[in-house]
């Protein structure tokens, strides 16, 4: 029976034993810990346990419009997060179809070398650990865009600079809010343990 391609919007609709799973412009919308949990579940339970199985992540380099609580995960982020995990390899590419350029990350699997039992916890920790570097990247971009262009350009160039500045400022704020929410949960958990 030939395999068929499907478009699904819910994990519950995803068939088991997929050869390739493509996540198209969605990872930035999924917050921590849901994103690392989703990736771990896809790797462990939805991909064929074969060396040809892979997850392909396409993300726009810049969002065309503001979104609520987004974090733009780049191919470099995914490489750092998955680096050194036995049985998982990551390669990256930039795809430039007509329109918005896409960052592409391909996560491949060597099932017999992968410890799926610890993968979810490991990925959650690595995504959280990546946030301080993401904040620094945002701050550098904000500084560059604030110092390097205000009043020096006009028209479309100035509008694009302002849009990019707003994009990095919003992403920085979203990361700060996410970290604050995590701190509240951790403090509440500690208080519950002390009672």
Image (cartoon, rainbow, N blue to C red):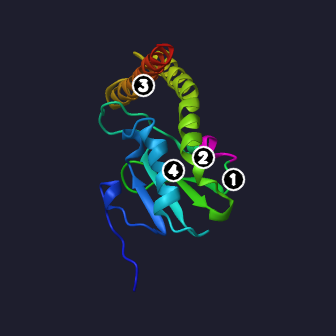
Left or right of 49 on screen, residue 57: left
- SS assignment at label 3: helix
Mark nearest the camera among 2 and 4 is: 2
Dot 2 corresponds to which residue?
118
Q: Is residue 60 left or right of residue 43?
A: left
Question: Do the CB atoms of the residues marked 3 and 2 lie less than 8 Å apart?
Answer: no
Instruction: Please give the range of residues in magenta.
Output: 79-84
Which numbered marker is on residue 178? 3
User: Which tag, 3 or 4, sits closer to the chain's start?
Assistant: 4
Q: For marks 2 and 1, give the CA distance.
A: 11 Å
Count residues near mark 1 (Cα–Cα under 10 Å), then give few for <14, some for 14-19, many for 20+.
some
Q: Earlier in the sequence, mark 2 or mark 1?
A: 1
- As drawn, the residue found furthest toward the bottom would be 1
- Residue 161 rendering spot, x and y as whole percentages: 40, 26
- Image quarter of residue 159: top left
Q: Is residue 77 visible?
A: no
Instruction: Determine whether 112 is above or below 24 in the image.
Output: below
Q: Which mark is residue 86?
A: 1
Inter-mark Cα distance, 1 to 4:
13 Å
Q: Position of residue 78 (x, y in %)?
A: 56, 44
As displayed, is residue 151 above or below residue 161?
Answer: above
Which mark is drawn over residue 177? Answer: none
- Check the picture and name the quadrant holding the N terminus: bottom left
Tell me the mark number nearer the camera, choosing from 3 and 2.
2
Q: Cβ–Cβ below 8 Å for labels 2 and 4?
A: no
Check disc 3: other Cα within 10 Å, few if <14, some if 14-19, many if 20+. Answer: some
Q: In the rendered image, which residue does mark 4 sit on?
A: 40
Q: Residues within 10 Å of mark 4 (few under 14, many from 20)?
A: many
Could you give the CA–CA distance between mark 3 and mark 4, rounded to whole angstroms? Answer: 20 Å
Task: Judge whether residue 126 is colored magenta.
Answer: no
- Contact, CB < 8 Å: mark 2 with mark 1? no
The nearer-to-camera label among 3 and 4 is 4
């Amino acid at each position: 029976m030939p395999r068929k391609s499907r478009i699904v919007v819910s994990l519950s609709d995803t068939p088991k034993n997929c050869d390739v799973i493509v996540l198209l412009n969605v990872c930035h919308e999924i917050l921590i810990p849901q994103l690392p949990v989703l990736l771990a579940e896809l790797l462990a339970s939805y991909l064929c346990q074969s060396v040809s199985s892979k997850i392909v992540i396409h993300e726009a380099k810049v969002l065309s419009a503001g979104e609520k609580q987004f974090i733009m995960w780049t191919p470099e982020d995914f490489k750092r997060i998955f680096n050194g995990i036995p049985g998982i390899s990551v390669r990256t590419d930039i795809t430039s179809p007509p329109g918005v350029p896409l960052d592409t990350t391909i996560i491949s699997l060597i099932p017999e070398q992968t410890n799926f039992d610890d993968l979810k916890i490991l990925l959650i920790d690595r995504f959280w650990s990546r946030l301080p570097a993401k904040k620094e990247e945002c701050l550098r971009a904000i500084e560059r865009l604030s110092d390097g262009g205000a009043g020096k350009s006009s028209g479309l160039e100035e509008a694009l600079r302002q849009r990019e500045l707003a994009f990095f400022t919003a992403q920085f704020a979203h990361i700060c809010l996410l970290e604050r929410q995590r701190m509240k949960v951790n403090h509440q958990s500690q208080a519950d343990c002390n009672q």
